[in-house]
């Protein structure tokens, strides 16, 4: 971009590239809907107002024009697709920037996984802002496929691959001043540092903020969000596939605090992205709740731009990126046209040029790895007592509960009890073939028979299996292994459905629509088996995440997250 040429167009001394006439522009600075023209030149907004000429003119006939939406925190890997296919899902909806944390692939492939995601994202109509994963591994209580110490994260920053430090998931370590965590924060001094601190409050929250965390997307109640906001954190309201916090948190918003609130999706599967939407869905829901429309647009664009220091976007103003979208109904905005860097890239929900979305090369550094010690694979749990700790999975939350229940004992073994919705869960090292395996019990999934399995298991992404009997669990586990990573559902010796994920065991290299179809076949089978969850596979993926309370399982054992330590499965009387 030539600044000289941009200024000449801004002064009206030379024609702009494109003039959008008769727009009703959403002005997130003044809070007004401005009836005006908008001149675009070399991918930027040259001017807002009348009197401009351009090589091309488009008359919007009074349609609304808004700044491109920003997803303030998302793991593209959770879409099960590569960045290009993710862009195909969200850009036609008006989402033009995504701030991503590639810690899923980083926990499998390390620094090369981060570089791969950044490389795949270049040249897309979606601006992908890569944050450096701070949680690789999440804690010492898991077997991960890689580790990213502070010096490697600093190298990513120095080479320009990353913009800031992604969510500080090890919040206990942050609060306690763990030297390894603090060294990562120090490496990003002056850069945005995202937080991740579920249920943190009081003096511990003070310590977390003092360490440098500047945001949080884990709030589950208005009270929690209000306290974190009052302590200086940006609140990233989240509406994911399995973490639906938006409607709970919208009552927080008022005229005094809305400038510190953003929207994010965190983890969304293809079906939800294509059917429900992304940040555009959150925007519509906020307006329907009663949030004034321009305020909702601020939360969906400008606020995130300011938190992350992306001052070249988030508003319709001179010098900003010409990332814009056109729609007709201010009360229920649906993108009709989307411009990325001044170029029309999507119309009526479809990308105009899909050739830029495809990446054919798959480096060996991110190819799916599946190294499981099958000679140590044993799902039996010898009964060491009459009562067991049971993970309680909660619908639409990644938080879990804990119950102590009577174990079902057969032939000296503690087994699943589907009649009481007590299933067996196993988390097995698939990175180092160490034979490490955690076994336990879980409630909430509702499966009456069969088993589900997958290598999508935040954040270590080991093999996780949940089932009603050992035979089905073994079949599902071997089906995933046979694909080199992916998702599967089985009953007895039969495999009902699979989804291969050849990219690090996390993502498909296939088109989004195909992945959606395969995934929905898995979901249909799980629901037929009795699961009550909207997405039992996404729910399963969080049951091994030992940084979100209360009880979780890793390949190393059962973890009491609040105590930040292992606990026994069996409870003494």
Image (cartoon, rainbow, N blue to C red):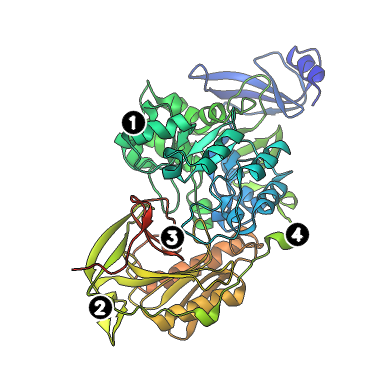
Q: Which residue is mark 4?
A: 360
Q: Judge by depth and name the residue closer to the eye, 272 or 75.
A: 75
Q: Position of residue 99 (x, y in %)?
A: 58, 40
Residue picked out by circle 2: 408
- Quadrant where the C terminus is found in the figure: bottom left
Decide which of tag 4 and tag 2 comes sooner along the chain: 4
Frontmost residue, 452 versus 43: 452
Which element carries disc 4, helix, strand or loop? Answer: loop
Secondary structure beneath label 2: strand
Tell me whether circle 4 and circle 2 mark residues in contact (CB < 8 Å). no
In the depicted structure, whether residue 331 falls above or below residue 425:
above
Secondary structure found at label 1: helix
User: What residue sits 29% from the left and 65% below the top?
Assistant: 390
Please name the residue that numbered disc 1 is placed on: 227
Give the spatial CA distance, label 1 vs label 2.
Answer: 43 Å
- Callout 4: few (<14), some (14-19), or many (20+) C-alpha neighbours within 10 Å? few
Q: Along the line of sight, which residue is nearer the eye, 457 or 493?
A: 457
For label 2, count other residues whose C-alpha is less than 10 Å away and answer few (under 14), some (14-19) or many (20+). Answer: some
């Amino acid at each position: 971009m030539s600044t000289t040429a941009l200024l000449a167009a801004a002064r009206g001394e030379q024609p702009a590239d494109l003039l959008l006439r008769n727009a009703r522009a959403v002005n997130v600075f003044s809070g007004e809907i401005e009836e005006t023209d908008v001149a675009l030149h070399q991918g930027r907004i040259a001017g807002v107002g009348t009197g401009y000429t351009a090589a091309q003119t488009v008359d919007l006939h009074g349609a609304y024009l808004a700044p491109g939406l920003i997803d303030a925190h998302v793991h593209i890997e959770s879409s099960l697709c590569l960045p290009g296919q993710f862009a195909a899902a969200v850009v036609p909806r008006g989402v033009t920037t995504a701030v991503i944390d590639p810690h899923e692939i980083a926990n499998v492939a390390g620094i090369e996984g981060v570089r791969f995601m950044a490389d795949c994202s270049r040249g897309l109509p979606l601006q992908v802002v890569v944050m450096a994963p701070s949680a690789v591994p999440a804690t010492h209580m898991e077997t991960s496929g890689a580790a990213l110490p502070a010096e490697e994260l600093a190298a990513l920053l120095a080479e320009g691959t990353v913009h800031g430090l992604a969510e500080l998931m090890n919040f206990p370590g942050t609060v306690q001043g763990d030297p390894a965590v603090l060294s990562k924060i120090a490496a990003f001094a002056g850069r945005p540092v995202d937080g991740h601190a579920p249920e943190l409050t009081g003096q511990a929250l003070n310590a977390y903020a003092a360490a440098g965390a500047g945001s949080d997307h884990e709030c589950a109640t208005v009270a929690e969000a209000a306290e974190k906001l009052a302590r200086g954190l940006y609140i990233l309201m989240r509406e994911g596939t399995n973490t639906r916090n938006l409607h709970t948190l919208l009552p927080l918003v008022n005229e005094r605090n809305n400038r510190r609130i953003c929207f994010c999706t965190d983890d969304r599967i293809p079906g939800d992205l294509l059917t429900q939407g992304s940040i555009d869905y959150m925007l519509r829901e906020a307006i329907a709740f009663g949030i004034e429309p321009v305020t909702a647009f601020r939360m969906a664009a400008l606020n995130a731009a300011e938190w992350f220091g992306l001052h070249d976007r988030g508003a319709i103003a001179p010098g900003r990126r010409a990332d814009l979208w056109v729609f007709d109904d201010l009360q229920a905005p649906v993108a009709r046209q989307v411009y990325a860097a001044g170029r029309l890239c999507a119309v009526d929900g479809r990308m105009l040029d899909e050739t830029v979305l495809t990446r054919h090369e798959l480096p060996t550094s991110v190819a799916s790895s599946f190294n499981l010690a099958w000679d140590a694979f044993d799902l039996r749990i010898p009964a060491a007592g009459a009562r067991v700790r049971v993970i309680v999975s909660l619908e639409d939350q990644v938080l879990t509960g804990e119950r102590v229940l009577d174990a079902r004992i057969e032939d000296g073994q503690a087994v699943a009890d589907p009649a009481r919705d007590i299933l067996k869960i196993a988390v097995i090292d698939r990175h180092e073939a160490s034979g490490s395996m955690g076994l336990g019990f879980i409630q909430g999934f509702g499966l009456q028979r069969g088993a589900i399995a997958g290598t999508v298991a935040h954040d270590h992404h080991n093999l996780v299996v949940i089932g009603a009997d050992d035979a089905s669990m073994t079949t599902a586990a071997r089906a995933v292994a046979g694909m080199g990573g992916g998702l599967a559902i089985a009953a007895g010796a039969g495999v009902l459905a699979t989804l291969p994920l050849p990219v690090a065991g996390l993502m498909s290299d296939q088109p989004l629509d195909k992945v959606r179809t395969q995934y929905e076949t898995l979901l249909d089978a799980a629901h037929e088996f009795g699961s009550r969850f909207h997405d039992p596979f996404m729910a399963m993926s969080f049951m091994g995440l030992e940084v979100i309370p209360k009880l979780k399982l890793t390949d190393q054992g059962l973890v009491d997250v609040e105590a930040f330590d292992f606990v026994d499965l069996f409870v003494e009387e």
